[in-house]
Amino acid sequence: MPPVRVAAVAAALIAAGCTPAPSQQVTEAPKAPATPSVTAPVSKAPVTVAKAPVTVAKAPAAAPPPAAPTPAPPSPPPLDLKSLESRLKDTSAIGVLTKLSLKNQVDDLITRFRTFHDGKRPPTLAELRPAYELLLMKVLSLLQDHDTALAKDINASREAIWGVLADRAKLSKYA
């Protein structure tokens, strides 16, 4: 490389911060011994270059700031057993004979809970839970297509109803 080019390259590298400061002397690298080059015959055929599709990477859009959490709408208060009983009586989604059958099943389950609260075993609370869930699912399946509001209220009150049945003092108020 001629000395002018070396100086220009050195100045560019110094400006880019890639080489030592200009006070140090930049020297030209020693040239490698010449080796005979092998040349291949040049073809006169036209060369075609396939162009690769160019894709431009876009910078990700700045994410909007997280919105403040909106308070959940207040859930309706859980149904108590009296209001549940009256709403089930009033619904037209269940036929009269089915209502009578459900009433008998509810009465049997409540009798089993009272037996549990009287200290007689079986049943245990763990044995009563599947029977309670099964009866609740039966009621929900009867209501789901024709009285969705009542079905949603019963489903939302599931744990509250269980709490009444599992607590002796609360169940005794239901008498």
Image (cartoon, rainbow, N blue to C red):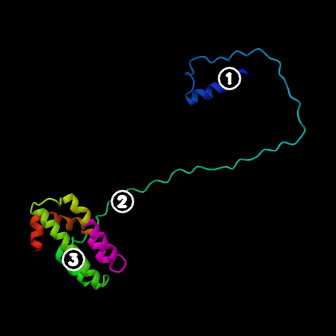
> Which residue carries the number 1 mark?
6
Q: Is residue 19 magenta?
A: no
Camera sees residue 74: no
Q: Earlier in the sequence, mark 1 or mark 3?
A: 1
Q: Residues within 10 Å of mark 1 (few under 14, many from 20)?
A: some
The percent position of residue 79, horizontal first and vertical second, equals 21, 73
- The three-letter code of the residue at mark 2 reads Ala
The percent position of residue 174, horizontal first and vertical second, equals 12, 73
Q: CA distance from mark 1 to mark 2?
A: 59 Å
- The three-letter code of the residue at mark 1 reads Val
Camera sees residue 151: yes
> Which residue carries the number 2 mark?
67
In the depicted structure, whether residue 22 falls above or below residue 94: above
The percent position of residue 74, horizontal first and vertical second, equals 25, 69
Identity of the residue furthest to the right in this view? 44
38 to the left or right of 148: right
> Which residue carries the number 3 mark?
104
Q: Residues within 10 Å of mark 3 (few under 14, many from 20)?
A: few
Determine contact: label 3, label 2, CB under 8 Å: no
In the depicted structure, whether residue 122 falls above or below residue 140: above
98 to the left or right of 166: right
Q: Is residue 134 magenta?
A: yes
In which quadrant of the rendered image does the N terminus lie?
Answer: top right
Q: CA distance from mark 3 to mark 2?
A: 51 Å
- The three-letter code of the residue at mark 3 reads Asn
Q: Residues within 10 Å of mark 2 (few under 14, many from 20)?
A: few
Q: In what element is the residue under mark 3?
A: helix
The residue at 31%/77% (across/down) is 149
